[in-house]
Image (cartoon, rainbow, N blue to C red):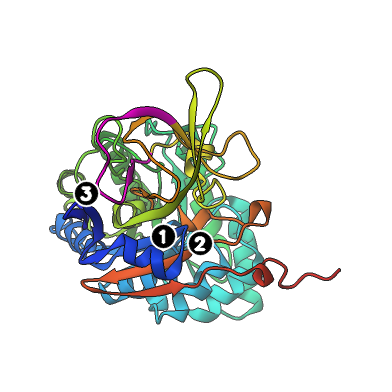
C-alpha cells in the first residue's frame, strides 16, 4: 500500500502533484509519503499482537532525521549499526533505552558512546567483540547489557549480498560455538547477559525461513537458561520483503506476525524486531527528469535521465528492479528502452529493456519503491551532489534534506 496515485492523469504523493515538487526543488529528489509511513508502522505493530514486542526501526534503511522522528513518535525504538546512527537517533529524541546496537565491527569509541548514552543492548557478533566491549565497559566503570547474535544457518533464499545467516556469512557466532561464547560473556567483567539475537537477511519473500530461525532460537533459549544465563530478550532481526513490482509478492506483514506469534508464544521473552525496508520502501520514490533520448546499435534505444547510480545504487549493486513510469499521463503506445543515468559507468542502468510509454526530453519520471536503501546509499561519485529529500503530509510538503551544492562536495578538503 502506498499513497502515490494518479489524479487527472498525473502521479501525486498524497495530495501533492509531483510536478509541483520538481518545479520547486528540482530533480533528482526523493519524495516520501507521511501517510504511507504511518500506515506501515501501524500495520506492522498490529500484526505482532500476542507477543511482548519492541520494534526498533533499522536506521540504515532510511536515516533522515525527519523519518526517524516520525518513527519515534509512532513508538519505535532504533536498531543502529554505527556511532553515526546512534548520533542520529539521539538527535531526534530517541529513547536510549529503546536502542539496540548491532553490527559485526564496532569501534571502541562507538561502544563508549553507546555506554554513555545508556542504550538497551549491544548485539555482539564474536568472542573478540565481547572481550573488547568488556574492556571498554570496565574502563568506563559501566555495565553493558549484551546479547550474542547467533548465526542459525538458515537459507533465506534472497540475494547473496543480503543473506546473512549462511555458514559462509561474516555475521554472528556459529551455532556450534554459541554456548561457549555465552559462558565467556558471563565470565567477563562489565557485561550483563540478557538476550539472544539473530538476523537471517533482507528482502525475504516467505515466512518459512523466519519460522525456521524462530524454532532454532526457541530451542536455544532454555539451553542458555539451563546454563545459568538470565535470557529475557530475543531479537529476531528484520528482513521481510516488499513488492518491487517484479515476481511474486512477499508474504504479508499479517502472515509474518501470525507465524512469529505461533512460533514464539509462551517463551517468556521480550521479542525485539528490526523492520526497515518493510516500513519505508513503498513510502518513497525517486523523482527524476529525462535529459535526452539516444539511439544505440540497431534497435537499442536509451533514455538518459538525471538520476544515476550514485543516487540509487540498488540496480547496479543488486540488479534490483524498480518500477519506472512517467509522472504525467502516459503517451499512447510503448517501446522497449534502457533507462540509464549520466554516471560514467556501464553499470549505471536504472531499468534495462523495459517496455515503457515513449519518454521525451523534459519528461518527469519516478522510480518507485525507492524509500529504503535509496538515499541511504547515495554517494557523490562523479562529483555529483546528492539529491534533495522531501516529506509530504496531505497537501503540505517540506524539504527534509537540502540538495547538496558544489561547495558541499569539497567541504573538509584542502588543495
Q: Residue at x 59, y 51 (%)?
A: 127
> Which of the two marks, 1 or 3, is nearer to us in this view?
1
Mark 1 — residue? 30
Q: Is disc 1 surrounded by few (<14), some (14 to 19) or many (20+) residues within 10 Å?
A: many
Q: How many numbered marks are there?
A: 3
Percent of width and height locating residue 55: 29, 63
Whether residue 230 is visible to the viewer of this picture, yes or no, is no
Closer to the camera, 365 or 278?
365
Give the x, y percent position of residue 151: 46, 41
Tell me residue 1's x, y (percent). 19, 51
Left/right of residue 415 with respect to residue 136 in the rendered view: right
| Pair 3/2: label in front | 2
The magenta-colored residue range is 322-337
Query: Is 326 one of the magenta-colored residues?
Result: yes
Residue at the disc numbered 2: 387
Magenta span: chief secondary structure: loop
Give the image location of residue 255, x and y in percent. 16, 43
Q: Residue 264 got which mark?
A: 3
Q: Is residue 116 visible?
A: yes
- Along the viewing direction, whichever of 329 and 52 lies nearer the viewer: 329
The residue lying at 47 percent from left, 66 percent from top is 388
Numbered disc 2: secondary structure: loop
Distance from the alpha carbon under mark 3 to that under mark 2: 42 Å
Nearest to the observer: residue 375 or residue 17:
17
Mark 2 residue crowding within 10 angstroms, few (<14) / some (14–19) / many (20+): many
Could you tell me which secondary element the residue under label 3 belongs to? helix
Q: Nearer the viewer, residue 234 or 104?
A: 104
Task: Work out how far the residue at label 1 is from the one at label 3, CA to CA, in angstroms.
Answer: 38 Å
Amino acid at each position: 500500500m502506498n499513497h502515490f496515485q494518479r489524479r487527472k492523469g498525473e502521479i501525486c504523493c498524497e495530495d501533492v502533484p509531483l510536478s509541483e515538487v520538481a518545479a520547486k526543488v528540482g530533480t533528482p529528489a526523493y519524495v516520501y509519503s507521511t501517510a504511507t509511513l504511518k500506515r506501515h508502522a501501524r500495520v506492522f505493530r498490529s500484526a505482532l499482537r500476542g507477543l511482548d514486542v519492541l520494534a526498533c526501526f533499522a536506521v540504515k534503511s532510511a536515516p533522515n532525521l525527519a523519518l526517524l522522528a516520525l518513527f519515534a513518535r509512532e513508538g519505535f525504538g532504533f536498531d543502529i549499526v554505527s556511532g553515526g546512527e546512534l548520533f542520529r537517533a539521539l538527535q531526534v529524541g530517541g529513547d536510549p533505552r529503546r536502542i539496540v546496537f548491532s553490527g559485526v565491527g564496532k569501534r571502541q569509541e562507538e561502544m563508549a558512546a553507546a555506554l554513555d548514552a545508556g542504550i538497551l543492548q549491544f548485539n555482539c557478533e564474536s568472542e573478540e567483540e565481547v572481550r573488547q566491549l568488556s574492556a571498554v565497559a570496565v574502563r568506563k566503570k559501566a555495565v553493558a547489557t549484551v546479547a550474542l547474535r547467533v548465526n542459525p544457518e538458515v537459507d533465506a533464499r534472497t540475494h547473496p549480498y543480503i543473506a546473512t545467516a549462511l555458514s559462509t556469512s561474516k555475521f554472528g557466532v556459529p551455532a556450534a560455538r554459541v554456548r561457549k561464547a555465552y559462558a565467556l560473556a558471563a565470565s567477563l567483567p562489565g557485561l550483563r547477559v540478557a538476550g539472544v539475537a539473530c538476523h537471517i537477511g533482507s528482502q525475504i519473500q516467505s515466512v518459512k525461513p523466519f519460522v525456521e530461525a524462530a524454532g532454532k532460537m526457541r530451542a536455544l533459549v532454555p539451553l542458555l537458561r539451563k546454563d545459568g544465563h538470565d535470557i529475557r530478550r530475543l531479537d529476531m532481526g528484520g528482513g521481510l520483503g516488499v513488492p518491487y513490482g517484479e515476481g511474486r509478492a512477499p508474504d504479508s506483514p499479517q502472515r509474518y506476525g501470525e507465524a512469529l506469534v505461533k512460533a514464539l508464544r509462551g517463551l517468556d521473552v521480550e521479542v525485539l524486531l528490526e523492520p526497515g525496508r518493510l516500513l519505508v520502501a513503498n513510502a518513497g520514490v525517486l523523482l527524476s527528469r529525462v535529459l535526452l533520448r539516444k539511439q544505440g546499435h540497431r534497435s537499442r534505444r536509451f533514455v538518459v535521465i538525471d538520476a544515476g547510480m550514485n543516487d540509487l545504487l540498488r540496480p547496479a549493486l543488486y540488479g534490483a528492479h524498480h518500477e519506472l513510469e512517467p509522472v504525467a499521463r502516459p503517451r499512447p503506445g510503448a517501446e522497449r528502452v534502457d533507462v540509464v543515468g549520466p554516471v560514467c559507468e556501464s553499470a549505471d542502468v536504472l531499468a534495462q529493456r523495459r517496455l515503457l510509454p515513449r519518454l521525451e526530453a523534459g519528461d518527469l519520471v519516478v522510480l518507485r519503491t525507492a524509500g529504503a536503501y535509496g538515499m541511504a546509499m547515495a554517494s557523490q561519485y562523479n562529483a555529483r551532489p546528492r539529491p534533495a529529500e522531501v516529506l509530504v503530509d496531505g497537501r503540505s510538503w517540506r524539504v527534509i534534506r537540502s540538495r547538496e551544492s558544489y561547495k558541499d562536495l569539497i567541504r573538509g578538503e584542502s588543495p
